[in-house]
Amino acid sequence: MLTREFDQTLFESYSDDIPTFLKKIYAARGVGESQLSLGLANLLSPNFSQLEQALKLLEQALLAQKRVLIIGDFDCDGATASVVAVKSLRLMGAKYVDFLVPNRFEHGYGLSPEIVKLAIQKKQPDLIITVDNGISSFDGTKLAKESGIQVIITDHHLPSDNVPEADAIINPNLKGCEFLSKNLAGVGVCFYLFSALKTHLNKAQYFAKNSIPLPDLRAVLDLVALGTVADVVMLDQNNRILIDQGIKRIQAKQCAPGILALLEIANRPVQTLQASDLGFAVGPRLNAAGRLSDISRGIKCLLTNDINDARRYAQELESFNQKRKQEQARIQEQAQAIVDEQEVSEGKFALSLFDPSWHEGIVGIVAGKLKEDYHCPVAVFAKSGEFLKGSIRSIPSVHIKDLLDLVDRENPGLILKFGGHAMAAGLSIKAENFWSFKRAFNDAIKAHLNDQIPTVELLTDGELEAFDISLENAEIIKNAGPWGQGFDEPIFYGQFEIVEQKVVGEKHLKCRLKLKGDTQVHDAIAFFQVPLESDEVKVAYKLSINIWRGNASLQLMVERISSTE
């Protein structure tokens, strides 16, 4: 375990109304006081390149009542972005706006030629807007344009050197784009586009001339928060504002009935909602539909204004989620068996795994779990028609999209197509090229890391004095969020004595701990932990709040526990 260092100058710069306890936490994350304000007024301005072109196209589409089709992605970010686009356009008077999401098993990812053909056949769009995809969709964009369809691409994934020839591209990672936050999720990009459109149309007197009430796009911030959390993007100030504002709307029940229905089915109370609830309870249930079938049910769940319809859709999504869990457990067990059989020399720098029975919608989660266990990039493949489709999850020291660029350049023809960002990517290869990819992938990572095996140390915020381990400080931490990627929730460590321990739910350890040298006993929970034989332990933990029958009490959420003997 490593203790975060904090900037003393930054620590001393905070105003006195911030508790000392919290000042250290903020200073260790390099966050100045000006970055702590989470009001909407602090959002960055929408200075995207190609924004003017996109706004003109959208204005023309609304004035002429063109048929607009949203093409999303089959995950939670793509689903929420699709709903934000549809709702925003309807609020602005669009009569012919619809969505279509690729089925990962039939159409592949993004604006593929297959999905364009289906769009023409079923929807006859005049304008296609991609959300959370499109930046690598060269062939589909070309086909749409040749078919007389205008194309606006909104995406956040990293572009290659060349980009599709769309009518406009809104992407903070586009070369030359001056938008300061490169960490927006797909739904964040979408929200920014329609916020800018509202401002543009209002200046042109569009709403007044057409007797349309001025849209309040704060109404979609619940969806922006959900998609941003679920996509595990870096939580810079801009993303924390979007999440915080969205969570406040959900807590006030000023949100999509679908979100309320999903929280209900996950047994998460709305009033005490945190960002982690969106990531662990709502997001996976939406993603399950996209992994096993069709994310459009998730989109319908979020689009409906009827709570009874929302509950019906939520129940369907829950069924998919249960099936997903079963399939994931099977694949994880088989993947672990393959890893266990490998020679010790293999897999130190990367793991590449494949079995013909694995489900292509599940391999990404399995890759993520193995990455956490082995602290190295992991690629897990499934059969998809004649080819293999893989999902990769990476570690902070390996920017996986850049690394795949390198593998592709050094091994022409090995990778058929790929895309992604720093921590996650997807790719397709020929089945006969699996072993060649495995070697090239491992070698490229080994070279990138200069033959140094990657290690991941648990970063903590140091030891707490006995009086700091309190419900009050747990409340302070909770209110200082949202916490997440790049703005990590504080973890502390200390030497404790185990007063009592018992297994609950067959695999979790519920215990009572006492800080060494103190008399106060604290409740604690350690997930997936067997009982310890030693009474003296070193514990890494978070301060959390346990609510039981309306009463709040302190609970230590154990991240790591080990004997000191």
Image (cartoon, grey):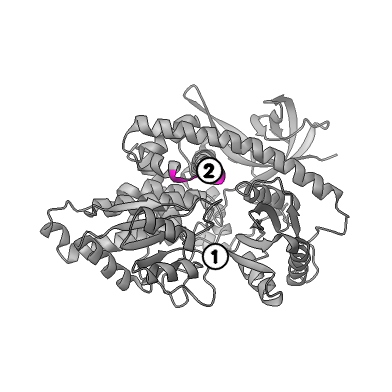
Residue type at the position of mark 1: Thr
Image point (40%, 39%), residue name: 301
Name the mark nearer the viewer: 2 or 1: 2
Task: Say whether marks 2 and 1 touch (CB < 8 Å).
Answer: no
Nearer the observer, 255 or 392? 392
In this view, the residue farthest toward the top is 549
Q: Magenta includes 201?
A: no
Q: In the rendered image, is residue 160 in sight? A: yes
Q: Quadrant of the C terminus?
A: top right
Task: Decide: few, some or many residues near mark 2? Use Cα within 10 Å; few <14, some 14-19, many ≥20.
Answer: some
Q: Say if 48 sits above or below 244 in the image.
A: below
Looking at the rendering, the stretch of residues picked out in magenta corresponds to 287-296
Q: Is residue 219 above or below residue 507?
A: below
Pick the front one: 30 or 311: 311
Displayed quadrant of residue 435: bottom right
Main SS of the magenta part reads helix
In percent of the image, x 75 and y 41: which residue is there?
333
- Compared with 382, 414 (above or below) is below
Query: In the image, which disc is placed on residue 293?
Result: 2
Q: Residues within 10 Å of mark 1 (few under 14, many from 20)?
A: few
User: Could you say where residue 170 lies in the image, as x and y percent from the top left?
Assistant: 40, 68
Amino acid type, label 2: Ser
Which residue is pictured at 70% across the width and 59% down the height?
Answer: 377
Q: Position of residue 209 (x, y in %)?
A: 11, 59
Magenta segment: does it hold 288?
Answer: yes
Give me the C-alpha separation between circle 2 and circle 1. Answer: 53 Å
| Residue corresponding to mark 1 | 9
Label 1: which secondary element: helix
Establish if 178 lies above or below 121: below
Residue 469 visible at all:
no
Which residue is painted at 33% across and 58% down in the image?
124
